[in-house]
Amino acid sequence: MRKMKSTIKTKSIIASLLVSVLFLANSCEEYDFGDTNVNPAQTGTPLPNALLTSALWSVSGYETQTTPSLYVQYLSETQYPETSLYAVGPVSWGEYTGVLQNLNSIINYNTDADTKTKALDFGSNANQIAVARILKAHVFSKVTDKWGDVPYSEALNGNTFPSYDTQESIYKDILKELTEAENGFDAGAMPSGDIMLDGDKAAWKKLANSLRMIYSLRLSKRYPGANDYAATQFKAALNDADGYVATNADNILYAHLDNNNFANRWYSLFLTRADYTISDVMIDKLVAKNDPRLDVYANKNTNGAYVGLPYGYTRDQLITWTANNQYSLMGDAITGQTSDSYFITASYMDFTRAEAAQLGWTTEVAATLYAKGIEDSWRQRGVYDATAFATYLADTQNAYAGNTAAKLGDQKWIAAFPDGFEMWSDWRRTGYPVLTPTPNNLNDNGNIPLRYGYPSNESDLNSEKYDAAVARLANGDTDNSPVWWDN
Amino acid sequence: MKKKCINALSRGAKYSLFSIVIQIFLMSSLLAANGMNGQSIREYKVKLELENASILETFKAIELNSPFKIFYKKKDINLETKINIIYGEYTVAKVLEFISKDAKLNFKQINKNISVAPTPDKEGGNNEAIEPGDVQDRTITGKVTSAEDGLPLVSLSVYIKGTTSGVVTESDGAYRITVPQNATTLVFRYLGFITQEVEISGRNSINVVMQPEVVDFGEVIVTALNIPRDAKTLPYTAQQVNAKELNMAQQQNVTNALAGKVAGVQIRTESGARLGSNASVRIRGNISLTSDGGALWVVDGTPGINPGSINMDEVESVNILKGPNATALYGQRAADGVVMITTKRAAKGDMSVDFTTGITFEEVGRQPNYQNSYGGGGSANWITYNYNPNHPAEWQVFDGKKYHDYTDDASWGPKLDGSEYIPWYAWYPGSKYSFKTTTFDPQPNNIRDYWETGTTLRNNIALSKGGEGYSMRVSYTNEQQTGLIPNSELKKNYISAKLDFDVSERFSIRTNVNYQDQETQGDFGDGYGNNATGNFNSWFHRDLDMDIMRELSQFKTPTGNIASWNHSNVSSTTNFNTANFNRGNYWYNPYTYFELLDNRSNTNRVFGDISLTYKLNDKFSITGTARRYEVFGRSELKLPALLANSASQAGYFNSYSTSQSRYTEDNFEFLATYSETFGDLSVDFNLGGNLRNNLSTSINGATSGGMVVPDLWSLANTVNPRVTGQGYSLQKTRSAFARTTLGYKEYLFLEATLRNDLSSTLPKGNNGYIYPSVGGSFVFSEFTEDLLPALSYGKIRAGYAESGSDLGAYTTEAYYGIGSNQFSGNLLMSVPSRLVDPNLSPVTNSSVEFGTDLKFFERRAGISFTYYNEKHRDDILSAQIATGSGYSSILQNAGSTKRSGIELVLSGTPVRSGDLQWDLTVNWAQNKSEIVSIADNLESLIYSSGTFGFARTVHQEGKEWGQLRGTAIARNADGLPILNSNGLFTADQNHYFGSVLPDFNGGIISTLTWKDLTLNMSFDYQKGGKFFSLSEHWGNYSGLLDETAAINENGKNVRDAVADGGGIRMVGVDASGNPVDRYVSAFNYFHQFYGTNRLAETMIYDATYLKMRELSVNYRVPVTKVFGNSPFNSINVSFIARNPWLIATAKGQDNWDPSDQSASYGENGQLPSTRSYGLSVKFGF
């Protein structure tokens, strides 16, 4: 083009571009957006009372863990019998990122110099820490009871490859923690958010001492002697001036509400599903003993009879059986929306003390404690009648004579219903009650499982530490490897 | 990131459109300008003076001073012809007329393109010439229209073959030519169309439909930031899909319409029974460790649009920007590619009314193969009913009769032997089937019978008009659909209004408003346990008669509940009034559920823009644009008491829940454009800035635990405290960018871009980043004309680009959330389970792409080839960590991935003979996305977990993206299964089965035209890519699929007792390595896959398929011939079919349609694939 006429000179265009660049020029690495990226509906700092409430609600979930309740044959599966046929595999440990981390956070918040003053709004530092330590020790015992060696000393601090501590060292630390926590309360305000004991310091101390007794007895196979570690720990707790759960008035109940969000967990379990019911093993035992707790533990079927659903049936067997029979459901008194459920009962402590006496750890009288255990259970369940109780106790099935360990095991098992988790640990340790495994087993060995498999992703995410822990197991990472205290 | 930046439109948070406009005026004051701008060559004026200029220079002058691009075949034109025009202001048409006189050329405007061709006879005539013949014996009249759109062709040359005598058509396409008696043939010639020779054969009236020629001039491609570009200048691949290819089969959404049409793009459709759903789009596989697809959708420059809001009737073209080389100007948001949609606008001088109406019918496509030999129940044994006097007297007739297990929802029941039995409904009084037995017969079509025939009615009217200084288009579409699921429907309305308005010579406004409302009713959940397929393919009784089910869907039993096939067995009751005997155990009658559930959601979407352009002069313009995309959603779910009460274990409560949400994205954009030519050098420069705010808010509430008063739809009417929720998220981004293209002559182009993004979601102090791109293209065919005459166009292109991406709002810090329920006034709170690395920085991508575009034989055939290699570093990912740490994941910069691939497009016209033309495009793409590393000491990363944990999509270091991982059958070194003592498989945990991404994929588009008939077909295919089928697992577990009742090697049914020769043969070794060869019962065999091992291996397949996506037969009614003078300009009738034919799938996989997948790991209990057929008529006035 020879003479294209542009009315604008190139120069002026470039000039205007430069002006605009200068006008707009700015840094490009950083810009202050103010609070744009601050989430208005969430907080960067925790509320220790809300963490405690959440932790207490989580802790109450152990009572309704159905897997151990199926292992100890409290329950039968009504329609999909996998767990009661011992289909076992990896089980996730949700505690670390849930309840344990919440409790850990309460302890840290009350310990760190930056935050401990602010934490005083929710109770004294010492009392918040003491409560959190008791609960944390308790949860860790549940964790190690399920899997054996687990991350402990290196856990919960963001270390992405925590080592697995031996169960022995974990239990020793749990007992140390409980002892220190029990002595750690001060005169200040008790923590807020305590939906379980509402800041009742004496009750917290009794809980701590009771747990010390239960957990030291758990080590009885490893430390059987009257002056061994376990007995020493047991006696220290038994003799602690702050006491333990000794009467039904001391019973520690889980907190729940008359709405479905926080209802009795047995209620929630059956709210829309009917996967479990009380087993024939339990019903037959109660019927044989003419035990009045039967009316509490079970409902009559529509024909007005107590019929337990057979334990360990296959689905095919269940269908055939249920086509011709009706089974009893768990009792309304257990499964009501606001029915009580228990963390620690006097009855359980009676049997715990009775066993310690049997072992010669204490000078308490086993027979008395045995009878008191049954009586406390009857009273707890509201079925106590002096005459009936005398008759019951006189029955050779129940009298404290003969194989007293078996008697004790049976009665503890009946009294603790439906808390299968504790009884699974007791059964593993003592062999009582005597349970017959299902013949329709899906696991390799046909035995009632002795532990859970480690979470499936541990071998991926923490392989070195996982391998080291598995190497310490007798039969590898299977259900057939006993945990340390079970040896 | 320590880089210096060019500039940033970012000082001060208060930038708005207003301030941009002020700047535009500020700058404009520095400049003067001229130009009176229209959009038609007859209106658009240019000022120029030419003195002995070459044609090439003249064309360039026009291109520079107007929005028009000029296209021509070089060999047709003598570019050295000199042109002289005295100084003045002329319309472009006038200038062309001058040229035409001097150079004997013919011009045609097609939108903004002007095509050039020599006049019919290179010697004589101009474009208006009529040169009468010697003998004027007869007159022939007629009308010429385009086959493309049926519109008249104006100024088309009609001449007598063998002479120079000719005329041109008038504005209505009519012509009148006088021919000598001896003339035999008329020639119709028009640029961009195939020249036609028509024998006169004594006729006085000849109407002609001209067929367009395959892309006979350079393509204009809409690129990033909505900048239209000449394809030859692009340094990256661009494959534009036009409205015609897109709209072959009246698709209801643009995502489905793209299937198979663009190389390197994988469209993963969902079941057509899910009304209102869109397909997901994977572009070049995947490269991010944390996202699967998720392309950015841009409509007329407005980004972030949900593809569901796009009206197919309005789409003019789709261009997919595939990698950083093409998306560099979109910055951080475009990491997964960009889908650019350009909608239709009116042209100047245009006045048209189009009305389209269509109806389609939809039915179920592929269904799994069910077994039809065994009925319902968990046990193969019949149960005999024994009457007892406590029972209702009506049951006495059943005494001694048999029934199968109703309680169990599987089909491991008795043989379907035609014997007499008591069906599920016969126990209740009040129906015509009460207390009557029937025969136990197979129902092979009961599932297919269940689905309704879906219908879709769609009507669109579009009005366009353009005149002096304005053009506008208004369109309205109404769509009403009923689905395959009973009682499901979708209603949609789309309204759009577009106005281009020249306020003054220099100042123009362009507006764009789109509104859509959508209402759906129905439950479209398609995961495990849904009440349609989640039932039929997972848990069902094969003996059920669907007609009776339909009839009894509202049948009430004595308890007032609605009975289900899945009620308790009669042993559980002695009377009519036991609840569990009168309602479903796990499942409703599938009609009952959908008829009673009221689940509505409404979505209103508005998007559009207003842009003001100030043209300072012919070379420099500035545009300020404000854009908004807004979505308002509302949903309500009413679950009536009757439904809640009619099942015992389905988990439903009488409930009401509702939610409202609002999402807005605002963009304020500034763009300066500058073009200049210095001799052979041309410069194109853009400078821009953008402020973006994304705000999302929501609130929801629900009753809990039932309602105090049944069916009173208030949130206050709740048994437990109502559940409420809220959402709020705000994100701000500030960006500045620049682009320049340098061109040398018409064959060498160099492009560079630079973008700076500042994002509020990144850590303070390090929230800005820059990425550049550079590329070039070389049109080498300019030099090979003599050497390779067959090559009509050849270009090579190459480029390097970087891009980045940020993360969601509020993720750089750990937040403690409050639980939604209080415990008696106590809040609940948990420690966040994710750790956050405080030093997060943006993700970076870098990509190299090169390729070539070749066209042969006068562009009749073409090949486009692209290779890309992209690296992705510092992905921001939430890596799983051992939970013993107290956390389940850590958000950090970790992970590096790469992908490379090849894209190939072959297009051409294999047949062009007389009235027959066949156009074919074949796409093929191969992509390999590889995980280079994930995070320190982390070898795998779970991308998504499937229901029940059978299969997960996992990234594994060193392997391809998205491995399907699950439990395999443990095998010995020889590959033999290791069997346990029961003869069943043992498990090999965490086995990698292969990537979910295909080995290669592509599509075929075929258009066959014969006279007024057009046959369109589109196909897509993929090879490989693994998927897991959850339905197959449960279908086998529950004894529904044919495998569970197959005939074994003994000629016995696998369900027969092993002792009788039945069962399934297991060949393998035991734990000690000894060979095992035995039979196990079918029940045990199919149940072994569940349990703790979750054996996935046998449910994992290749997602290979070849599918005909679209088929249409289009008939262009010869309007003039049929109707004579009528208001119609055109009428098109189309028969259409969507997804008519799943042609092939992987061997051994004939239960599922792998082209429909609801989850990244595959099939998750999803709704069935569908196919549809219909009719559509389009009227042009």
Image (cartoon, helix red, strand yellow):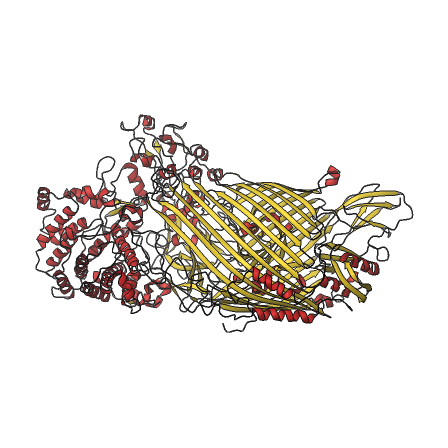
The one nearer the camera, B1027 or B327, is B327
Percent x, y of residue B484: 50, 41
Q: Is residue B913 left or right of residue B327?
A: right
Residue B1147 visible here: no
Quadrant of the image occupied by residue A485: bottom left
Residue B994 visible here: yes
In the displayed structure, B937 sits above or below A42; it is below
**Residue in the picture at 23% in, 40% down:** A299
The C terminus of chain A lies in which quarter of the figure?
bottom left
The one nearer the camera, B981 or B824, is B824
The one nearer the camera, B1088 or B818, is B818
Quadrant of the image occupied by residue A295: top left
Q: Is residue A87 left or right of residue B994?
A: left
The one nearer the camera, A129 or A149, is A129
Percent x, y of residue A263: 28, 47
Percent x, y of residue B637: 42, 43
The N terminus of chain A lies in which quarter of the figure?
bottom right
